[in-house]
Image: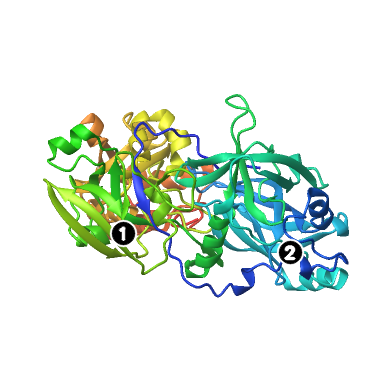
Amino acid sequence: MVKYMMKFVLGRVSLALCLLISQTSVLASAESVPFENFPVGDAVPQIGQMDWDWVHSKVRNMVVQVFVFRTEFNWVEPYKTPHQGMASGSAFFIDQAGLLMTNAHVVNAEHGIYIQIPCFGKRRFDVEVVGICPDRDLALLKVVAEDLVVIKDELGALPVLEFGDSDKIKRAEELLTLGYPLGQQSLKSTMGVVSGRQAIEGSFMIQIDAPISPGNSGGPALDKTGKVIGINTGSMDAERAQNVNYIIPSNEVRLFLKQLDQAPVCRGVRLLRKPFLGLLVSDGSEDMARFLKNPLTGGVYIPGVIPGSPLDKAGVKEGDMLYAIDGHEIDYYGEIKVDWNEERVAAIDYVSRLDPGETVHLTTYRNGAKREVSVQTVFADMLPIRIFYPEYEAIDYEVIGGMVVMELAINHMPILIKMNPRLSRYLELENQFASKLVVTHLLPNSEAVKCRVLRPGMLIDEINGRKVTTLKEFRNAVKAGQPSGYLTMRLDIESLGGILAVLPLARVLEDEPRLAATYFYRVTPFVESLSSHTRASSRPGARLLPAFAGALGGSGNGH
């Protein structure tokens, strides 16, 4: 199991009100058919009479082991062949069409998935990813048609699990987790109790004390009625805590299934994200409210509103204070009281359960004046600086002068933040609304290294005197400056005042075939076009740049 939680601790936590688009889904088959669809021969006991022995006797073939061939994208040298490996996890059937639920991190970066069902021994069946939501760590799989026929011929009907209501689960209630820990190829079960609920990195989890080991991820957590009340997802590092493990609430899974067919299709898979409503909030205080001449009953401060968002259009401004959402009073810490949880919850958890097109009513104050704002929930654009998924999204890059340039992503942080700690500011939500260009790698013995100024992790602010934030702007600026014969860059303007780097363009282009052949990458179409233009515009008698003999003329514009 690959741990899905990022290892970053933000210096200052910013709360963003998020909204997932949710409409009646065409995935009607995802409504599970419970135990009676599985020919077990026994009558289903009445609720209240069920016990763990009965549950154990019915779930054996409902939980399957998942094997994944995966690749790991190289975020500093994106032209390199991805690292290859294999991983395993767990999943379970949810309907007769062959749909299975598991974690996104189990199948992320997959290039081939198959499952083993206990009653078939070590025989393996092919499955494919139908949809995935990395933000919720959920994925929907489906058995391929020909294998589904084989399975049904043997079993008669698929053994499916039904989802329970995770909102009704209480502390100290018993549960049973199922899965295939540590890659072991026989189903294991573990008893535990519900410890409570916990918000982790923007997601609302149920904390349990039943162990969740690598390989258990994607397996179900069942209550005494045999219904799924959560999906195993992760655990706290054993060095930090004992018996602290997490499951994704079943009602989060329902939201995922309901909303999935509204998600865009990326490389044949529906990729569902959590878009932002457009509002940043931070903790308020009585002194803050008094200073801003607002009521002392609570409320959070609004440090920023995303330009063009519904709240921006509705007139919500930076410096306002937010006091209520749909009549739920917000305290100084951004939390409200709801009827579906024992304790107060963050406003982010409330908004994430709303349907699309639903009207949200906000109560704000500005300099003592009360304002009632109503906006309809909409699907917002993705943040420019975010986590990207190369298996579902095209990743652009440019290699020129021995310098690898990419648009900054959260994926870069584990490596580049060690080289430039100032990049940590882009882990903060409020700094992710505008693209940034970053140098991810320098090739040895290149013009980029010889200039002795450039370093991996540096941000590129200007090219040939032009402000640049995207690769499109980068390429346009390089091309526009070609007549000067130089490629000039201003870097890290915000933090270091703007370091100047100057590369001789003729030598950069002349050196490109050697670098491409030495470091096994393809000369990008953009660099080829620069070289072709230079050769075509050379005056008679001038030394021409050599052709790109020996260098591959492929693409660096999307992995």
- Could you tell me residue 297's position as x and y percent? 24, 42
Count of numbered badges drawn on the protein: 2
Check disc 1 and report the residue beneath it.
Answer: 533
**Front-lying residue, 556 or 280:** 280
- Could you tell me residue 104's position as x and y percent? 59, 52
**Front-lying residue, 17 or 446:** 17
Check disc 2 and report the residue beneath it.
Answer: 160
Under circle 1, the secondary element is: helix
Mark 1 vs mark 2: in front:
2
Under circle 2, the secondary element is: loop
Which residue is drawn at the image coordinates 37% and 64% (left, top)? 379
Gap between marks 1 and 2 measured at Cα: 62 Å
Q: Amino acid at mark 2?
A: Val
**Front-lying residue, 440 or 384:** 384
Q: Residues within 10 Å of mark 1 (few under 14, many from 20)?
A: few
Q: Are marks 1 and 2 in contact (CB under 8 Å)?
A: no
Residue 255 can be seen in this image: yes
- Farthest residue to the top: give it: 239
Which residue is drawn at the image coordinates 62% and 68% (left, top)? 30
Decide: is 256 above or below 414. below
Q: Is residue 450 left or right of residue 264?
A: left
Q: Amino acid at mark 1?
A: His
- Could you tell me residue 366's position as x and y percent? 14, 48
Decide: is 430 above or below 480. above
Q: Residues within 10 Å of mark 2 (few under 14, many from 20)?
A: many
Where residue 296 sits, quadrant-wise, is: top left
Q: Is residue 484 left or right of residue 152?
A: left
